Amino acid sequence: MSTLQGHLYVRRTSVPGSVRAEAEHFTGGRNMVERPESEKRVDDSEFMDIAKDPAQARILRKALERLAEGGAGDTLKEMAQEVLSGRVGLREASTISAYSDALVTGMQPFKEKWDQTSDSERQNLAAQGERHLEEERQEIAKEQREAQQGGRGARTGSKHGGKGWSL
């Protein structure tokens, strides 16, 4: 299936239910296919508009990485890959019906399990979640300290001390 929208030619892939599109710009009679770098990955900051803090953003990114491995099906794998590559934002992905339908379907077993969970079990799960968040916060703080220490003290004196320079 393909459509022409202005100067952008959108072609859906052959994967059933797929919404990944390749963009081809028509310039000067030549097709220019835009493809991002295959190794490009967004970092945790990409999710700060959704997450409340860096630890939640990191947990969200890690969850997307697990989805990108394919364990939840091809549609969610594709969605996660698109978001992690930066081609689609997470908010935008959630508005794409194929992705949102797959998310709702995939969450149904968790909802059913949650509905059957007692209040005390829910409190225990909430406490586990808080501990996990705190562990991520501590890991982020440790990484930041290491990065700051790596920037300081690694060299003594200026890189260019001026010795041996002449004009």
Image (cartoon, grey):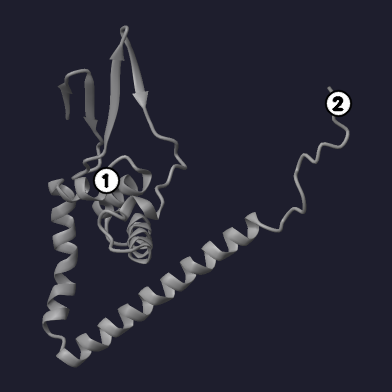
Q: Residues within 10 Å of mark 2 (few under 14, many from 20)?
A: few
Residue most toward the right? 164
Q: Nearer the viewer, residue 122 or 130?
A: 130
Kindly identify which residue carries mark 2. Answer: 166
Task: Tell me if residue 13 comes above or below residue 56 in the rendering.
Answer: above
Where residue 79 sits in the image (x, y, percent)? 27, 49
Which amino acid is tagged 2? Ser
Q: Is residue 49 above or below residue 161?
A: below
What's under tag 1, amino acid-wise? Gly
Q: Position of residue 163 (x, y in %)?
A: 86, 37
User: Which residue: 21% across, 49% down?
Assistant: 91
Where, by quadrant of the figure, is residue 47 drawn? bottom left
Name the residue that disc number 1 marks.
89
- Numbered badge on residue 129: none
Classify the position of the C terminus by image quarter: top right
Q: In the rendered view, does 48 fall on the left or right side of 118? A: right
The residue under the point 12% across, 48% down is: 97
Q: Residue at x 14, y 47 (%)?
A: 95
Residue 3 lies, with reference to residue 36, above or below; the image says: above
Image quarter (top left, top right, bottom left or bottom right) of the N terminus: top left
Q: Nearer the viewer, residue 147 or 11?
A: 147
Residue 94 position in % (x across, y down):
18, 51
Identify the residue at image location x=16%, y=79%.
Answer: 113
Secondary structure beneath dot 2 equals: loop
* Quarter where residue 61 is shown: bottom left
The reply, left or right, for residue 141 in relation to residue 111 is right
